[in-house]
Amino acid sequence: MRITVVGTGYVGLVSGVCYAKLGHDVMCVDKDPGKIRILNEGGVPIYEPGLRELIAEVRQAGSLSFGTDLPNAVRRSELIILAVGTPPLPNGEANLAYIDHAALEVAEAMNDRKIIAVKSTVPVGTNERLAGLMRSRSAVAFDSISLPEFLREGSAIHDTLHPDRIIIGADSEEAANKMLELHEPLTDRIIVTDIRSAEMIKYASNAFLATKISFINEIANICEKVGADVSQVAEGMGCDRRIGPSFLQAGIGYGGSCFPKDTNALIQIAGHVNYEFKLLRSVVEVNQDQRFSVIRKLNAIFGGELEGLNVAVWGLAFKPNTDDVRDTPALEIIGRLLDAGAKVRAYDPVALDNFRTLLGREGVTWCGDAMEAAQGTDALCLLTDWPEFAGVDLSRLQAAMARPVLIDGRNVFQEKELLGTGFVYYSVGRPS
Ligand code: UGA
């Protein structure tokens, strides 16, 4: 199939590359000539394990190309996938300006019947509205498909090539059948539904996963007070197949470009039809507060006096295996530390530059490795569960620090590893 993907962000780029891997003839277009230049030169504008190698492989096979010429890319393809960003507006609603613009550009370029599939996360009803917009610009017939994306950053290629399910929201049987054929090699769990339900499945899935995280974080907070161990509790709960073991990892809360944006957007979507999504509001509130559990623990250890304290921070990305710092808990935690007069030494294996730009303020010493960040500090806060942190030499770490205080915001270490080492160790939801 000849496919054009509009937008080379995480979703667009990874999807385009994976369709090319399946043997389709894919062209990825982006308005940003800088991104396209990087891609054409064999680089990748984002950090995603395995992506660079896979792009090289499918380009070599001649099944993937990059460009900025959207009209030409539209004319050459039968399927146009819209995967542009829908970032949050200040009020939490999704900003649909980019997708509206892309849809209009596609409409103006259409020369014969196309399938227009939307992979961007968009509020319920958006696909229908976009179709209306496109019809106002073009007399050429097309079919609308809602094709929500469920990939996770850091394991995006695996998630795309081995999905738990594919959701196809369609308004025509013929287009639905074509999309079924396209996705059949990936999984036998394909659900064909109406467009509005497909749009809702995406929001409901992310909202539910966010709910699981806030739920286990609140259980963790109670565990700390009653002397129970949240890791054991999560394991015990997860054995029940109705609950499942995933997304019960207690920590400092979720971040990233998806859960914070989509939970707030769903609250807004409900609000527009006069429904107050009380549960989801609490999920967001709990998540916001959980970030500061690190600061509360530091305050408890240092008697509320953080001024002049030297604090190491390990991990700035919102999760491991990505350089993405959008809505990362580290931003607010480091902000609070600096506001309280602490001095911060920060390290992340790949997200340091992105984070430095995002923070945009002085007071942080940026370090090239984990031990350098820990050097001479009074406390170490671990904020992202990068695998390299788990393998750190604890006696070297203790020797490097002025005071061996370890606040493990992701439960990377096991209590027994630290027993007898002299570390003051606080994790999340486990006895200290
Ligand atoms: C999430 C969903 O998992 C994907 O299915 C979805 O496609 C994507 O959003 C999206 O809408 O595009 P992602 O944000 O890349 O993917 O990352 P996750 O692995 O889901 O992690 C999100 C956050 O939750 C991270 O900050 C992570 O540290 C946190 N988390 C996750 C926990 O605190 N505990 C857990 O048990 C799991």
Image (cartoon, rainbow, N blue to C red):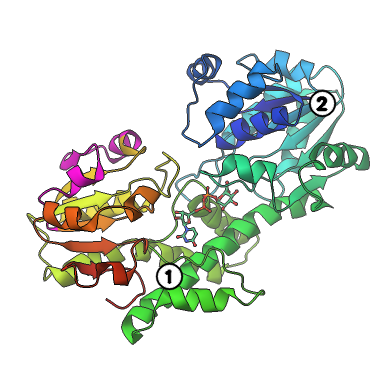
Q: Is mark 1 within 8 Å of ligand 1?
A: yes
- The crowd level at tag 1 (other Cα within 10 Å; few <14, some 14-19, many 20+) is many
Separation of disc 1 and disc 2 at Cα? Answer: 45 Å
Q: Quadrant of residue 225?
A: bottom left
The residue pinned by badge 1 equals 217
Disc 1 and disc 2 in contact, CB within 8 angstroms:
no
As drawn, is 327 to the left or to the right of 205? left
Q: Residue at x 68, y 27 (%)?
A: 5
Viewer can see residue 341: no
Q: Along the line of sight, which residue is nearer the eye, 170 or 50?
A: 50
| Residues drawn in magenta | 353-378
The one of 129 and 217 positioned closer to us in this rendering: 217
Q: Residue at x 28, y 41 (%)?
A: 359
Instruction: Measuring from the top left, give residue 88's x and y in whole percent.
Output: 50, 45
127 left or right of 52?
right
In the picture, the quarter occupied by the N terminus is: top right
Left/right placement of residue 334 relative to residue 216 reads left
> Is residue 209 covered in magenta?
no
Q: Amino acid at mark 1?
A: Asn
Q: Residue furthest right?
A: 174
**Looking at the image, which residue is at 37% across and 76% down?**
221
* Image coords of residue 423 (percent x, y): 18, 66
Q: Amino acid at mark 2?
A: Met
Q: Residue at x 10, y 65 (%)?
A: 305
The answer to whether 419 is drawn above or below residue 291 in the figure is: below
Is 7 located above or below residue 94 in the figure?
A: above
Magenta stretch encompasses residue 360: yes
Q: Which residue is mark 2?
A: 1
Q: Quadrant of residue 140?
A: top right
Q: Residue 261 appears at what percent x and percent y?
A: 51, 50
> Where is residue 39 drawn, in percent x and y?
54, 19
